[in-house]
Amino acid sequence: MRTHLAWSGGVLLGLSLAVSVSLAFQPPAQPPGRRGGAGFVTPVMDATPPELPKDLKSGGLLIFSKTNGYRDDPSIQASNAALLTIAKRRGWPAFVTENAAIFNADQLERFKVTVWNSTSGDTHTEPQRAAFKTWLENGGAFVGIHGAGGDPKYDWAWYPGTLIGAQFTEHSSRQLGTVHIEDRNSPIMKGLPADWVRTVPDEWYSFKENPRARGMHRRADSPGVARKRDGVGAWQEWRARVSGRKINLPMGQ
């Protein structure tokens, strides 16, 4: 596998588009212990790590979709299927789990990228948080999709403040909008028009802080969303934020 798998333009573009097309895939079977449909689930903290397949090669994708808050099961299962399809087509090893105990030093070193697919709530124990933070700071890579940055409060301040880049406050109802590409030179924006008119309704996220200074490749306006005002001015725009080896994609309901 190529050493630049995590941050090649093709990887990031592929993962970005997976969010947009995920509902075209048939969801696989529901993970054990999780209910279907949409709604809040009872929080569970994991202590025993999952067993990785013996033939799983190192350097691939860890797709993580645990929810300890709100869960939209059809959306999660469909996008997990989309991500696995992309990985298979490109020849990348991939493993899907909702067991946060996989976030330990020994198992994390088997992966190049971890994709948090619409996770919710506080999902990790203190040792699991520490293992993930150390792995990320030593060359790992993070992709957050939709709900991964969509809780109004976290017990783990580093997660929204540093990793995501801004604290979520609220989102609109599902509605149409237009995505404006601000950095057309970025490889992850390759193939997208300057103004990407969405034809599928989505939830549009608001954040407490304006994350523009942290790096932004695209923003969006939805005419039915009321503008909010905070310390940096009025704004309610969908943002893909990139800083170092991490990217957060709020779109994808």
Image (cartoon, rainbow, N blue to C red):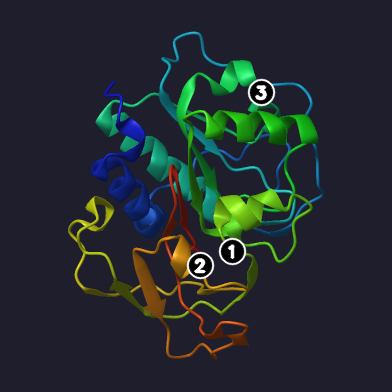
Helix, strand or loop at disc 3? loop
**In this rendering, the label closer to the viewer, 3 or 1:** 1
Q: Which residue is mark 3?
A: 104
Say what amino acid the circle numbered 2 marks.
Pro
Is residue 72 something one can see in this rendering? no
Say what amino acid the circle numbered 3 marks.
Asn
Q: CA distance from mark 2 to mark 1?
A: 6 Å
Q: Crowding at label 2, few (<14), some or many (≥20) Cα neighbours within 10 Å?
A: some
Q: Answer yes or no: do the residues labelled 2 and 1 have beta carbons within 8 Å?
A: yes
x and y, in percent, of residue 62 in the image: 50, 31
Q: Is residue 238 above or below residue 139?
A: below
The residue that appears at 45% across and 15% down in the rendered structure is 56
Helix, strand or loop at disc 1? loop
Q: Crowding at label 1, few (<14), some or many (≥20) Cα neighbours within 10 Å?
A: many
Q: Crowding at label 3, few (<14), some or many (≥20) Cα neighbours within 10 Å?
A: some
The residue that appears at 56% across and 59% down in the rendered structure is 165
Between discs 3 and 2, the one toward the N terminus? 3
Q: Is residue 156 above or below residue 169?
A: above
Say what amino acid the circle numbered 1 marks.
Ala
Q: Which residue is mark 1?
A: 166
Between discs 3 and 1, the one toward the N terminus? 3
**Label at residue 32:** none
Is residue 187 something one can see in this rendering? yes
Helix, strand or loop at disc 2? helix
Q: Is residue 194 left or right of residue 27?
A: left
**In this rendering, the label closer to the viewer, 3 or 2:** 2
For the residue pair 97 and 180, the one nearer the viewer reads as 180
Q: Is residue 156 above or below residue 234?
A: above
Q: Which residue is mark 2?
A: 211
